Amino acid sequence: METEPKDVIVLGSIRRGKKKFSNIQNETKISGEELNSILEELENKKFIRVEEKKGFFGKKIELKITETGSDELDRKIIEIQSKWKEMKSLYENGDKQQLQQKMEENKSFLPTMMFFGVMDMMMFSMMFSMMGIGMSDFVSQQDMADQGMDDGGMDDGGMDDGGFDFDIGF
């Protein structure tokens, strides 16, 4: 059963404990209309189930991943890990053409790799540098911002200038 990359991200969000539409939308950054469509499709495939519960202010709807959905998610995560390992190997071998081709083939899975933390963002950045192209050619600015990459992936590591004294007394 074929699952689209955004479907996988939504399944992952639900398995991480997001049960409400708004929480899933906040985590995945998918528009309401598109998310509704994805949720309907996932329910039709029996990957999720909708549960109505009595809440303090009336009934509330919660989304739960099914065993079938969890199995599909595990299968897709293994698949994207394999795709990442292929790209990493091509990078390490210095094969620019093959790497660029593989990245083109897997373009739709790059946000999924970022969402699940499958890729090493530093290595991903170095791949683009090796190929001499910009990351924005493959990943949208929104996806990069969602993963903390909107500043080019650079940060100060949480260090401030007045922090540590490294004099160890030798």
Image: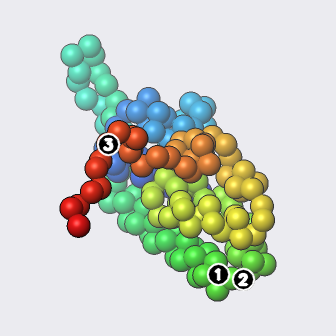
Q: Secondary structure at mark 1?
A: helix
Give me the residue at 45% from left, 58% from top: 117
Q: Nearer the viewer, residue 9 or 4?
A: 9
Nearer the viewer's eye, disc 1 or disc 3?
3
Location of the C terminus by quadrant is bottom left
Circle on res. 95: 2
Residue 48, image x and y in percent? 40, 49
Residue located beneath label 3 in the image? 163
State the CA–CA distance, disc 1 to disc 2: 5 Å
State the CA–CA distance, disc 3 to disc 2: 42 Å
Give me the residue at 75% from left, 56% from top: 134
Q: How many marks?
A: 3
User: How many residues crowd mark 2 within 10 Å: few (<14), some (14–19), many (20+)?
Assistant: some
Q: Nearer the viewer, residue 83 or 97?
A: 97
With respect to residue 24, does 57 lie above or below?
above
Q: Amino acid at mark 2?
A: Asp
User: How many residues crowd mark 3 within 10 Å: few (<14), some (14–19), many (20+)?
Assistant: few
Horizontal side of 23 relative to 91 (left or right) equals left
CB contact under 8 Å: marks 3 and 2: no
Nearer the viewer's eye, disc 3 or disc 2?
3
Give me the residue at 76% from left, 74% from top: 101
State the CA–CA distance, disc 1 to disc 3: 40 Å
With respect to residue 118, does 145 lie above or below?
above
Horizontal side of 68 relative to 99 (left or right) equals left
Residue located beneath label 1 in the image? 90
